[in-house]
Image (spheres, rainbow, N blue to C red):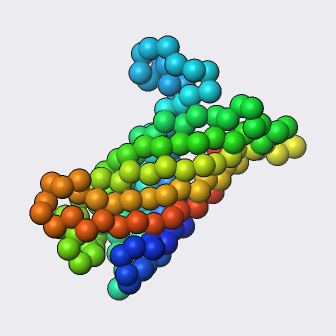
Amino acid sequence: MTPGASYDPSPTFAFALLHGMAVYDYEDIMGHPAPEALRFKFEGNIGLSDHSQPRLLASANIFAQYYLRGLAYGALHPYIEGGVGLIYTDFQVKDQGLRLNFNPQAGIGAEWHTAHGTRWYTALRAWHVSNGGLHHDNRGINAVTLQCGRIF
């Protein structure tokens, strides 16, 4: 689950997304040597915003995820991540231009294991929506998200 809230532009809005992801060793995807702590993450999201009424959001993203091994403590494994993808919004803010946009994100997170071996994670991300100048109207959306979930 990923709840989030925009902080720019005004008026702000909230949203909630269901997401699924797959994480791989970076070397397995990119085919060249990489640090052991580096991972490649594919992520898909779908959800609703409260932008004037419930509206659809859907995105697909890729991330580089780097575990901060020096900060690991017991079953807690912190990481940083950053990536980009495409997002479709069933709404537009004033001067946005397009409904299909780029969705760069960066964040910090942590994975941990319970005593029973269940794996969980949470991440805090900065989230941006922009058409990257593909349309003359390019008003972006900036938000903060909090991801929480279980790893299977």
Q: Is residue 86 above or below residue 72?
A: below
Give above or below for 139 relative to 61. Answer: below
Q: Nearer the viewer, residue 45 or 76?
A: 76
Q: Residue at x 35, y 67 (%)?
A: 141
Residue 138 in which image quadrant: bottom left
Residue 94, quarter of picture? bottom left
Q: Is residue 101 left or right of residue 69?
A: left
Q: Relative to 72, is 130 on the left or the right?
A: left
Where is residue 127 shown, x and y percent of the image? 44, 59
Residue lying at the far left of the rendered structure: 136
Quarter occupied by the N terminus: bottom right
Q: Nearer the viewer, residue 34 or 20?
A: 34
Q: Is 120 situated left or right of 16 in this image?
A: right
Q: Is residue 133 above or below residue 68?
A: below
- Residue at the image point whose x is 36% and y is 76% from the top: 9
Residue 8 placement (x, y as % from top left):
40, 73
Find the residue positioned furthest to the right.
115
The x and y percentages for residue 79 are: 63, 41
Residue 102, above or below 115: below
Q: Nearer the viewer, residue 84 or 55?
A: 84
Residue 29's spot in the image, x, y percent?
A: 44, 23
Residue in the image at 20% along x and 74% along y: 95
